[in-house]
Image (cartoon, rainbow, N blue to C red):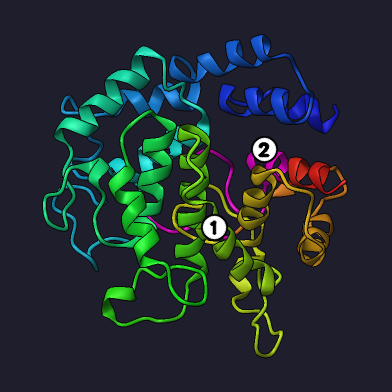
């Protein structure tokens, strides 16, 4: 069986992206497969776990009653990570399920920080970046969150969730969340107001070749060389490459070392493994665990390398 055949045996959320990004299928075929995300497989199972008020696990960023130290890692079952995962899976915004869900979240979900409405965002940049990506993808007004992110950009070009606590250097984790959000907003609204900020943030990553210290050239964090899915708020090299592929420009020469890392991780059977799964409770196990072939990472790696030429 070829790798493409193996990918096409996966969930509808995998299949429609393989058709679009690797097989160049026509728009009608891709859309028909994407529609199935709302009614079959992982997408339908996540939607079935939604509470009647539109939230998951009774909370915006954290499940109702969550307290740090009482669980193994951060739980990924609340509204933010679940709705973000549905966005990545490709839940069609125009589907009845997409329309109903986003309306309920807009009207009833409030942030734990200070009770702000979900699509008004809160204060942490990594949260607000993902909120913008969700809102832009599902047709919600996130203009105010975007304005806050533009005001919060640090002098070195990126963002850091600890800015309010005095951080002056950017975090790759926060920066990639914001960059994905700004690009989604740009695409959804046609706005050019965020382009300069987005480019500055991207330059922050490019100067560091996606994973090396600007000062010494050392690897910033070995975990970034491991490819996980879902990524949640965490940065890794494959996530960085996926962002630049999504931008659509010709690959910057400074990405070549990152491309080589992806190539080197290809297994003899043509697949890529799941690595470094982020601890914490989840609704669904999407793959077979770390060290096993991953349809998600294989899809993501193949389309990044296809873009690399």
Image location of residue 212, percent across then percent down = 67, 77
Which residue is pictured at 71% across the width and 84% down the height? 217
x and y percentages locating residue 3 in the rendered image: 81, 33
Q: Nearer the viewer, residue 174 or 148?
A: 148
Label 1 or label 2, whichever lies nearer to me, is 1
Judged left or right of residue 22, residue 240 is left
Give above or below for 72 relative to 229: below
Which numbered disc flags the more N-terminal residue, 1 or 2? Answer: 1
Within the image, what quadrant is residue 142 found in? Answer: top left
Q: Is residue 81 visible?
A: yes
Q: Secondary structure at mark 2?
A: helix
Residue at image mark 1: 196
At x 45%, y 34%, the residue is 189
Q: Is residue 22 left or right of residue 275?
A: right
Residue 187 in the image: state x and y as whole percent. Answer: 53, 36
Q: Residue furthest bottom?
A: 216
Residue 78: which numbered mark, if any?
none
Was residue 201 drawn as part of the magenta stretch in this picture? Answer: no
Residue at screen point 16% across, 44% down: 110
**Picture layout, residue 301 above or below residue 21:** below
The quarter holding residue 51 reads: top left
Q: Nearer the viewer, residue 104 or 201?
A: 201
How far across and down, in percent of the image, does residue 299 sit?
70, 38
**Can residue 282 be seen in this snapshot?**
no
Neighbour tally class for label 1: few under 14, some 14-19, many 20 plus, Cα within 10 Å: few
Quick check: is 280 in the magenta stretch? yes
Query: Magenta residues?
Result: 276-300
| Structural distance between the alpha carbons of marks 1 and 2 | 35 Å
Instruction: Assign a secondary structure to mark 1.
Output: helix
Q: Is residue 144 left or right of residue 112?
A: right
- Identify residue for label 2: 295
Q: Quadrant of residue 7?
A: top right
């Amino acid at each position: 069986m070829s790798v493409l055949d193996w990918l096409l045996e996966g969930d509808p959320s995998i299949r429609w992206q393989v058709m679009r990004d690797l097989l160049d299928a026509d728009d009608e075929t891709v859309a028909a497969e994407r529609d199935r995300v709302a009614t079959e497989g992982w997408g339908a199972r996540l939607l079935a776990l939604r509470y009647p008020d539109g939230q998951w696990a009774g909370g915006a960023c954290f499940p109702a009653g969550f307290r740090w130290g009482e669980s193994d890692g951060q739980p990924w079952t609340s509204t933010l990570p679940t709705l973000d995962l549905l966005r990545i899976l490709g839940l069609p915004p125009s589907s009845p399920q997409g329309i109903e869900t986003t309306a309920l979240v807009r009207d009833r979900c409030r942030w734990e920080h200070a009770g702000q409405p979900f699509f008004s965002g809160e204060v942490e940049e990594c949260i607000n970046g993902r909120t913008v990506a969700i809102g832009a993808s599902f047709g919600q007004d996130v203009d105010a969150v975007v304005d806050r992110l533009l005001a919060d950009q640090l002098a070195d070009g990126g963002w850091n969730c600890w800015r309010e606590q005095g951080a002056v250097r950017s975090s790759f984790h926060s920066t990639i969340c914001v960059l994905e959000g700004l690009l989604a907003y740009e695409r959804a609204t046609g706005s050019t107001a965020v382009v300069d900020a987005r480019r500055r943030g991207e330059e922050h990553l490019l100067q560091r070749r996606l994973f090396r210290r600007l000062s010494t050239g050392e690897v910033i964090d070995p975990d970034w060389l491991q490819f996980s899915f879902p990524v949640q708020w965490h940065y890794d090299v494959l996530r960085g490459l996926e962002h630049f592929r999504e931008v659509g420009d010709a690959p910057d020469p400074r990405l070549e070392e990152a491309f080589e890392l992806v190539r080197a991780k290809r297994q003899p059977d043509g697949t890529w493994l799941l690595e470094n799964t982020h601890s914490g409770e989840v609704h669904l196990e999407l793959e077979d665990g770390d060290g096993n072939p991953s349809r998600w990472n294989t899809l993501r790696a193949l389309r990044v390398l296809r873009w690399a030429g």
